[in-house]
Image (tube, grey):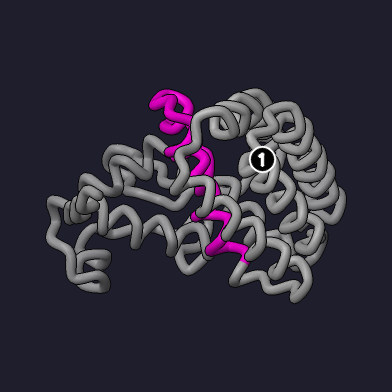
Amino acid sequence: MGVKPAQSLTDQAYSTLEERIVTLQLAPGEVISEGVVCEQTGFGRTPVREALQRLAQHHLVSIFPRRGMFVTEINVQTHLQLLELRREIERLMVCLAARRRTAAEHLQFAEIAAAMEKAAETNNDEHFMVLDKTFNALVGKACRNAFAQTSMEQWNPLSRRFWFRHHTLVGDLPKMAALHADIAWAIVAGDEDTAARTSDLLVDYLTTFTRAALDAGT
């Protein structure tokens, strides 16, 4: 069994900043200073600058010459467009994962499915957020399609931030967790049809959730 390579400093800086943006520690519209980020995180200017460039590519940071850098705003209409893309690509990815997952990944999906069911029962939002990130990374790996995996890595932080921002007012965490569990169990079973159908049900729910956030004006 191979040793997992260590994250580069840029990857570490990206992960740190991404989590701060997703959990709204860095608020939408907030100005970002390279120097301040370096002081707060302990990373050097080069990995911080490279991480911010990647965050800009993933639409979490906007960079304006001579004006500076800002955390992007959360936009409901843009999020609905993202869901249109997610529906098609995620359906493909979960089907491929059901077909191509390894024996080790089979066990990992089973563990995630059981943990998602537990999160649904306990309505534990912090536990769900961690599981959701792990689940998405595992689907990206198990589908064995680098282009689809890159797409998920780009949109997932945007989706997680939107959920974090709105779920306490208009979200149904038990339903969200249960739908993830259903997809994971379908992948465990190697059932591509059920994985695809449940993936569509998840995006249906997320679309309803997004429109509820719009109607609530949050």
Does any portion of residue 35 appear in the rendered image? yes
Circle 1 packing at 10 Å, graded few (<14), some (14-19), many (20+), is some
In this picture, residue 113 sits left or right of residue 69: right
Name the outermost residue toward the front. Answer: 103
Residue 171: quarter of image: bottom right
Confirm whether residue 10 shows in the render.
no
Q: Quadrant of residue 204?
A: top right
Q: Nearer the viewer, residue 97 or 33?
A: 97
Residue at 58% across / 55% down in the picture? 132
Callout 1, which amino acid?
Ala
Which one is nearer the viewer's eye here, 145 or 32? 145
Out of 105 and 11, give the one closest to the viewer: 105
Question: Which residue lies under the disc numbered 1?
Answer: 189
Name the residue: 66% across, 70% down: 125
Q: Residue at x 37, y 40 (%)?
A: 56
Dominant SS in magenta:
helix
Q: Is residue 193 above or below residue 204?
A: above
- The region drawn magenta spans 128-157
Q: Percent x, y for residue 140?
A: 47, 37
- Left-right relation of 158 to 26: right
Q: Secondary structure at mark 1?
A: helix
The spot of residue 206 in percent (x, y) is 76, 44
Residue 215, image x, y percentages:
86, 49
Residue 130 part of the magenta-drawn span: yes
| 124 relative position to 4: left or right | right
